[in-house]
Each structure stands twice: as structure tokens, then as C-alpha cells.
Amino acid sequence: MNTANAYPIFRWPSIKKMFGHRELYQAIAFLLSPQLFPIAVLLGTMYPELTALINVVTIMVGLIILTLAIRVIQKRQRKFGYVNRVRILPVIGVFIGCIIATIMMTYLYTSMGVTMPSQSNQVSLDTLFGRFPVIMFFMIAIIAPVTEELVFRELLPNVLGPSYLSFIASGFLFVVIHSPSGIMGWTSYGIMAAGFLYARLSQRSIYASIAVHIIWNMVSIIA
């Protein structure tokens, strides 16, 4: 179906077609690309005298990744007729909805005696951010939202179907790769995945979910 959001509830994927799908390998490449940033931080730690050079090279590589991701998005917009603009108020509404849901979740679990354990993904990012703030800010606030939304709200759902169930399955994979700890961690990332997916489907635009994701990550950095 070449009409945006014209998805069935479920569509049985062809395994042979799935592994022959070019978008599967695009998804893998974009999913792995942000890992270049932690590698750059590691190199900077090993060779502190090259910090400035590593920052410049990493930012340039990040811009190349960003450019490639946007080209893929634009190509898909032309092919499937997606909306190429974002309505700001609904984006802010989704973000606020995620915040309210997270607060309610925290209150509910806390009243039941459940506490939020340290999230390994967040701890690792905080450590890396402390060492190389410029590189990590660029990765967390820009590169990760664009590549992750392209992978989990566009490419993988299409490889798996596409259908509403494939979007949900891809959202579950999004939660899994962030290595949540405890029921509160799983619920928190689940709320994020649901909010990003709602933005993508409701506005028929991947840019909407990217915008919500960017706002969420930037607020997390500031907080």
C-alpha cells in the first residue's frame, strides 16, 4: 500500500522477503551508526592530546550519518506520500502526555513499594557525556533521535509487514535495545515508545516522532 497509514492490523511477513529486504540492512546500519560516538569517547580517553581532532572528526561523521538518514526519509516521503511538515502543538502535546504518564507510573509504582533501579543505558550515557559533552550532546540530542526513529518507526515496521502490529513489535525492540531494568524501567521506555509511535502515526510524518524524541532527550540531558 502506497498510502500513508493505510495499514492492516496484521500482515504475515515473508521470511525470505524480509531477509532480502534492502531496508533491513539500512536499519541495521543506522542502528549501529551511533555506536561510533562511544568509540570516539574511548579513543579520546586513550589519547587526550587528540581530543580536539576527535571532536571535529566525530561531528563530521555524525553530519554524514544525519545527511544519509534524511535522504532515506525524503525518499520514503516521496514514495509513500507522507506528510513532510510537523505540527508543533501536537508534538508538544505528545511530549507532555508522556511526562504525565511517566509521573503517574512513578506514583503508582512508588505507592506499591516499587522503586526505579539504575538504568544501565542512562548510566553509561551520563558517564560518556561527562567526558566528552560536545560529542555526546550531538549524539543524544540529534543523531540518536533521527536514526532510532528512522529504524523503529519506519524501516523495521516496513520490513516486518507493514501493519499496526509490526509497528508495535518494532516499538518493543526499541525498548529492548535500551536495556531497561525493573518493571519501572520497562514501563518508562514503553511510554516513550508509545508516545513516539503515536506522533508518527497521528501526523503521518516521521519528523513528528523525531521532534518528540529530540525534545525528550534534550529535557533528559538538562534534567
Image: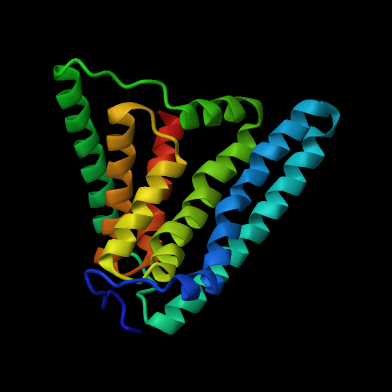
Closest to the observer, 20 or 64: 20
Q: Is residue 210 visible?
A: yes
Task: Please indicate whether residue 35 sits to the left or right of residue 92 in the image.
Answer: right
| As drawn, 196 above or below 222 | below
Determine the residue positioned at 48% across, 76% down. 17
Task: Please indicate whether residue 41 sits to the left or right of residue 91 in the image.
Answer: right
Residue 75 at x, y percent in the picture: 51, 78
* Colouring of the image: rainbow
| As drawn, 56 above or below 64 | above
Closest to the observer, 51 or 27: 27
Residue 186 at x, y percent in the picture: 32, 35
Number of numbered discs = 0
Determine the residue positioned at 53% across, 61% down. 27
Q: Quadrant of the C terminus?
A: top left
Residue found at the far top of this picture = 113
| As drawn, 85 above or below 39 | below
Quadrant in the picture for residue 161: bottom left
Determine the residue positioned at 33% across, 31% down. 185
Q: Is residue 87 visible?
A: no
Closest to the observer, 200 or 221: 200
Residue 122 at x, y percent in the picture: 47, 30
Determine the residue positioned at 57% across, 44% down. 139
| As drawn, 55 above or below 157 | above
Q: Quadrant of the N terminus?
A: bottom left
Closest to the observer, 213 or 188: 188
Residue 29 at x, y percent in the picture: 61, 59
